[in-house]
Image (spheres, rainbow, N blue to C red):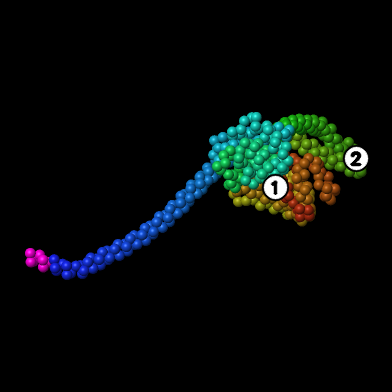
Amino acid sequence: MHIISSNWETIYRFAPVIFLIIIGILFFLFVERNDKVNELRANLKKLNNSFDELDDQAKIIIKTDLELNKAQEKLDKRLNGLDALQQISRLISTTLDENEIFERMQSSHLAELGFERFLLLTSNKDNTVNCRVRLDFVDEEISEIYTTIKNTAEISALLQKGDYISSSKSSQELKELLTKLFKVNNFVLTPILVQNELLGFLFAGIQSNAFNITEGDEELVSILSDQTGQAIDNARLFEQSYNAKQMLELKVQERTKQLSQALEDVQVISQNKSDFISAVSHELRTPLTSIKGYAAILMTGKLGTIPEKVSERLEKINKHSDNLVKLINDLLDISRIESGRVKIKFLQHAIPSLVENVQDILSPQMKKKDINFVVNVEENCPKVMIDVSQIERVFINLIGNAIKFTPKNGTITVNISANKNREELLCSVIDTGIGIQEEEAAKLFNEFYRVENEVNQNVKGTGLGLALAKKIVEAHSGKIWAAGQLRKGSAFHFTLPVEQKTEEATEG
């Protein structure tokens, strides 16, 4: 008991201290708890602020996402429209048939442009309307639409200028008129121009208010209308060209027929001429032979002594008779060659040896004028297939012609050479005579043509020598031509094929 009593006394004695300690501990715990509460409240406030910021950011993200989706949707619509425009452009640009242009603008492609209603109208010169393409339009609407567009001065004026009309840029009055007329809320109306003339118009519209017409939509429809007009223009130009070609072909056929008939007539006339010349020549030969014979008998004195003056006249008769015989022979030869009555006998022959023979024949005339005669022959010059007597006449005519027009102490040169592939032989007769004018060179081979110069005025000729040479060369499948300058000499050239298709060919 004493121990218990002692314990209580001890407790009683230290009670105030213990109480103070407990109060201190409680106070400390209270302060610490209050600090934690304040800290938690501060953290809660921060957390609330963070949540508010996250909410704002979420709203921004959602808004941005919606805007991105809307932009993506517009972009997809734009890309689909461009892809559809590309397909339509490729289809209409690869045909030159006007009706097929509109047939290729299919409804599926038009719908992909991003419009719900689509209409393309054109008019003829008689003002009749043609509905070329339509999407979600019926016949009853089309007549009213065309009449209203045509009779509305403001719309007609804009389309004539080549301007487009859209719901985003037109006046309120015009917008109300067109939205009511076409039964849409947004639209683009563009002209179709061909050669700067209004052919019709293209309309694209949207009934929904969810999408507004953008500049991209306006550009899309404008490009399509421009390409449609270009395709129509190309088709019409092609049709005009085709029709012109057909007309030209008909005219060419008609002209060819006329020319063929004219050629036949010329051939008949030429044949008649040849026959006439041949007949007349034969008829002249007999009296000329008699005249020449009688003149020769008289000149011999067998019928008595002939006075000097009579003898002079007889010589003139004999000389002119020889000229007439030569003229007749040349005419007969030309006539025979033209009519094909002369058979060319081809023989393989060397041209240089032929020129030597001609030189021997004409040497007296060249010596009389002291003419220097030069022959240049290419080494290993090939032989040619010719009628020797005929080609000899060509050289006689050309060299004789050169002698005639070359003055004393002049030079005549004969050149003979093969071409690069040695298929032709080129023969040239060049003189240092009075020459010819360039415009007269082609006329020299016409029958009876003679150049007006001092030599021809003093020396008579028939004008048939060069014409005969031309006929002979052409009969050998060759060509002949002349060149030269006045007062600087002349040059005559002709070619002969090395080989000829003949039935008769022997070594000459």
Q: Is residue 104 magenta?
A: no
Instruction: Name the mark on residue 427.
Output: none
> Which part of the image, by quadrant, shows the C terminus?
top right
- Range covered by the magenta-colored residues: 1-7
The mark nearer the N terminus, 2 or 1, is 2
Q: Residue 305 carries which label?
A: 2
Q: Name the residue under label 1.
A: 493
Q: Dividing the picture into quarters, in which one does residue 188 lie? A: top right
Q: Identify which amino acid the numbered label 2 is placed on.
A: Thr
Where is residue 36? Give x, y as percent. Answer: 31, 62
Q: Which residue is drawn at 17% across and 70% down?
A: 13
Q: Position of residue 394 (x, y in %)?
A: 72, 43
Main secondary structure of the magenta stretch = helix
Return the x and y of residue 31 as percentages of the image width and height: 30, 65
Residue 348 visible within the image: no
* Residue 167 drawn at (x, y percent): 63, 43
Q: What residue type is labelled 1?
A: His
